[in-house]
Image (cartoon, rainbow, N blue to C red):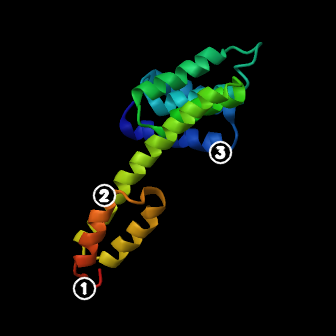
Amino acid sequence: MNLQSFLKKLSELAELHARREYEAAYDLVIDLLGQQPHSADLLVKRAILEQLLDRDEPDGDVTLESVRAHLETAHLLQPCAVEPLLELGHLAYAVENDPEAGLRSFEAARESAESALREALLGKIKCLIEVGEPTLALAEIEAAAACFDGDSDFEELKAAASRAPADPSGR
């Protein structure tokens, strides 16, 4: 399957899920996993759909252990991805009645999301300074203070933005 076809199938999968056509979405996920067996996103979608279809019930064709295995594999494939960690947290807390394990997964998800947010904000602020938008950069730094107050990288960028001239072209 070429990339264009794969992307079309992913779009179809999202539409099926949005329309709550879970059985058709599950069949498509299984088909796509045949093409991309190491896709963390598809493994998470499979685990979610197996639970939505109650395939993990005692009389279902899937076990909770296999749902957990899909999520753990997705996490191994993409250790910084938030979604597998969130789903592991929900599984532990709501299904397995293990709030301590859920807490560990949710904390790891928060740390991963926070790290990605920090890098995104630092990059955006640097670009704003570079294109002559120090006022916008300072506004981003101010907003970032809610999560990253006292972070030396943001403090350095605040000083740089305060010294940077605005772009006279009004970009």
> Given the image, on which type of amino acid does mark 1 rest?
Ser
Whole-percent x, y for residue 46 in the image: 58, 27
State which mark lies toward you, 3 or 2: 2
* First along the sequence among labels 1 and 2: 2
Rendered position, 113 above or below 72: below
Q: In the rendered image, which residue does mark 1 sit on?
A: 169
Q: Nearer the viewer, residue 1 or 147?
A: 147
The alpha-carbon separation of the residues under discs 1 and 3 comes to: 44 Å
Residue lying at 53% horizontally and 38% vertically, measured from the top left: 107
Q: Are marks 3 and 2 in contact (CB under 8 Å)?
A: no
> Given the image, on which type of amino acid does mark 3 rest?
Ala
Residue 152: mark: 2
Rendered position, 65 above or below 52: above
**Which residue is outermost to the right?**
59
State which mark lies toward you, 1 or 2: 2
Rendered position, 12 above or below 165: above
Residue lying at 25% horizontally and 82% vertically, measured from the top left: 166
The alpha-carbon separation of the residues under discs 3 and 2 comes to: 42 Å
Q: In the rendered image, which residue does mark 3 sit on?
A: 18
Element under label 1?
loop
Q: Do the residues labelled 1 and 3 touch (CB within 8 Å)?
A: no
Rendered position, 73 above or below 127: above
* First along the sequence among labels 3 and 2: 3
Residue lying at 42% horizontally and 52% vertically, measured from the top left: 117
* Screen quadrant of the C terminus: bottom left
Whole-percent x, y for residue 55 in the image: 70, 20
